[in-house]
Amino acid sequence: MLTLAAPSVSAQTITEWSAENRLSLSFHVNDEALQRLLPAGWTSAPSTAPGDRGANLRVVFIDRQVVLDGQGKAFRTGTSRYLVFAVPARNASGEANTVIVRGLSPEGPGAYGVNLTAVVSTVTRSSTAQAEEGGRTEESWRFAAASGERIELQVAYRRALAVKSHAETKLRSALHPELTRTYKIDQAADVVRSASTPDRVESLTFRASGAAFAPLFDGKETLLSVTSLPWYVREVSVP
């Protein structure tokens, strides 16, 4: 997932490296409910990009296939899967960052301290390829917390050539906005649905339920874009 670019930061300590497969959904959700999740002094800064103009929330499904710590050793089991709610936001001084406001993870609160602990965390993925076409992919993601929060996604789409890019970006936590994590990212992105590209999504079902999610997904939300990231490599550093 690309976020608002931040200046290069010196004197950083590398804490993590990972290679991942991601799927990102951009929504416009209830503005008032979203604002209540942001820390004091921060306001939502919806996307102005042609493909998902007005998107104020990204739900990012993450399948980390290799996870290393700052010394290059496997972190915990060396793999993990979870999801996060990422909000493009701006503070009173005009600084723009992505703020992580919610998540579901079997590893608990996570680096940003905002994840609910997932007791269900599954992903299945199947792909077919053809000689003259990009092929087709089906994905199913399920996350659930003991408290009743649940996210489910089933999607099928036709693939195209993914676009490689590099980015450096800074993320903050809604719980501790003074703390930052800087990502150096190499990725390949395939936008399978947006307002500015052909729609290659064949089917999609997204469900969000539970007390923590209902105010955002109140039945009036709008899905604006879907992006597959078949590979996403990031190096994480902190001041």
Image (tube, rainbow, N blue to C red):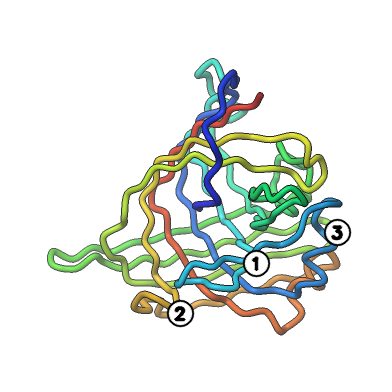
Residue 229 lies, in percent from the top left, at 42, 54
Quadrant of the frame with the C terminus: top right
Q: Is residue 211 left or right of residue 155?
A: right
Total label count? 3
Q: Which mark is residue 56?
A: 1
Q: Is residue 147 left or right of residue 1?
A: right
Amino acid type assigned to the residue bearing label 3 in the image: Ser
Q: Is residue 29 visible?
A: yes
Q: Residues within 10 Å of mark 1 (few under 14, many from 20)?
A: many
Foreground mark, 2 or 1? Answer: 1
Q: Residues within 10 Å of mark 2 (few under 14, many from 20)?
A: few
Q: Is residue 225 left or right of residue 121?
A: left
Residue at which label 3 appears: 147
The residue sitting at the left extreme is 132
Disc 1 element? loop
Separation of marks 1 and 3 at Cα, in angstroms: 26 Å
**Of marks 3 and 2, which one's residue comes earlier in the chain?**
3
The residue sitting at the bottom extreme is 220
Pick whichever, 57 or 239, lies toward us: 239
Q: Which mark is residue 203?
A: 2
Residue 205 lies, in percent from the top left, at 56, 77
**Of marks 2 and 1, which one's residue comes earlier in the chain?**
1
Residue 103 lies, in percent from the top left, at 71, 53
Q: Quadrant of residue 9?
A: top right
